[in-house]
Image (cartoon, rainbow, N blue to C red):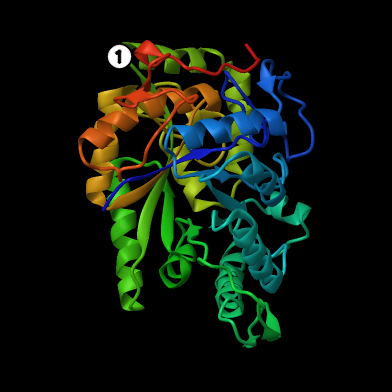
Amino acid sequence: MNVHLHWFLPTGGDGRTLVDRHAYTDGGIKRDRITPVSGVRAPDIEYLAQIAKAAEQLGFEAVLTPTGTWCEDAWLTTAALAQHTERLKFLVAFRPGVISPVLAAQMAATYQRITRGRLLLNVVTGGDSTEQRRFGDHLDHDRRYARTAEFLSVVRGAWGGRPFDFDGEHYRVEGGLTALPPDPLPGIFFGGSSAAAGPVAAAHADVYLTWGEPPAAVKEKIDWIRGLAEEQGRTVRFGIRLHTISRDSSREAWATADRLLGDLDSETIAAAQQALGRSESVGQQRMLALHGGSRDRLEIAPNLWAGVGLVRGGAGTALVGSHTEVADRIEEYHALGVEHFVLSGYPHLEEAYWFGEGVRPELAARGLLSDVPVRTGGLPVANGRSASAPGGAPLLIAGGR
């Protein structure tokens, strides 16, 4: 079982600070307790194309593109970026319930033909009722997961190549199909930590994706989902969503983490924690419990830092350390059964290079990666590092402080 490395497209903005528009809002509409964040890089297509090209050149398999109010539409953005890349896949996040499942199946089929098979799907059921209502969705938490199960049943049925009927609580479809099913079928990534989410993952997910908790907690989740899947005669693969701060030395990496933390004042953290605390997501509550809103004891496991989650919703932990230490932690998760690593870092352009030129060669040397040729800026790479970038320094620097 090889490690599959994926990166992240910050379609809600990027920068040298821990920026998350959703966490910085009161109820999602206005900022009345937070001063504007400086140094934010707009998610324009030129900047996102730089990140996508860097990810492709550095050997990442795909990039996750988020969904929600505070980011650009994932389908449209990645369809545009596919024209700027050749091999990179796009892990497109989307919400069931705000789109017809048959239309989603058709969109996926078209996407596969346009990009020659470069689509992966990240199904986001949603854990914030305020956000869901903004899109016209008024179901409660558990019923949203029940609807997701029906949605995915219809999608897979419509991909079957013949008319498909479905009569459920949330969807009624007569003769649903895609005239030309996608080839290959997009892999379905799905996450959820609640009791309602587990059976959906077991029945429908190709890859169960968890946020970055300590290894023992991740093992418990893997055992849980694996057991549920076995009861249904299925096999599910596993992935983890993490940030990274990897440097030539551990001291440099932790200094970067300390700088990110130093940019946050107490008011910013308090406002973000208040907003995130209203989430119905069990996974989000587990993220908050890792640090309790405190700056103290943020290294919750070796090289696993919970500082990101002080202000950012969703994935709130980062692997911090030397390239060797970060590779050690990835190998540790891999030994538990984690195959897919969906990574990110602030800023996303520079951190892609730190990881790609520093950690990736370590993983390759351990035999954890498939043999994918990596080229950076058209120059030959030795040991995963461009000849023009001794020491692993970032090659492309965009604007921003």
Q: Quadrant of residue 110?
A: bottom right
Please report the residue visible at 30 percent of the width from the left and 68 percent of the height from the top: 227
Q: Position of residue 286 (x, y in %)?
A: 44, 45
Residue count near mark 1 (Cα–Cα under 10 Å), binned few <14, some 14–19, many ≥20: few
Q: Position of residue 106 (x, y in %)?
A: 67, 69
Q: Quadrant of residue 59?
A: top left
Type of the residue with mark 1: Ser
Left/right of residue 155 with respect to residue 217 in the rendered view: right
Q: Is residue 131 above or below residue 57?
A: below
Please report the residue visible at 27 percent of the width from the left and 53 percent of the height from the top: 337
Q: Is residue 150 above or below residue 187?
A: below
Please report the residue visible at 72 percent of the width from the left and 31 percent of the height from the top: 44
Please report the residue visible at 67 percent of the width from the left and 16 percent of the height from the top: 39
Pick the residue in front: 28 or 125: 125
Left/right of residue 72 with respect to residue 125 in the rendered view: right
Q: Quadrant of residue 69?
A: top right
Q: Position of residue 320 (x, y in %)?
A: 36, 25
Which residue matches tag 1? 249
Q: Does residue 393 show up? A: yes
Q: Position of residue 80 (x, y in %)?
A: 69, 44
Q: Is residue 318 above or below residue 80?
A: above
Q: Does residue 301 show up? A: no
Q: Quadrant of the C terminus?
A: top right
Pick the residue in front: 361 or 221: 361
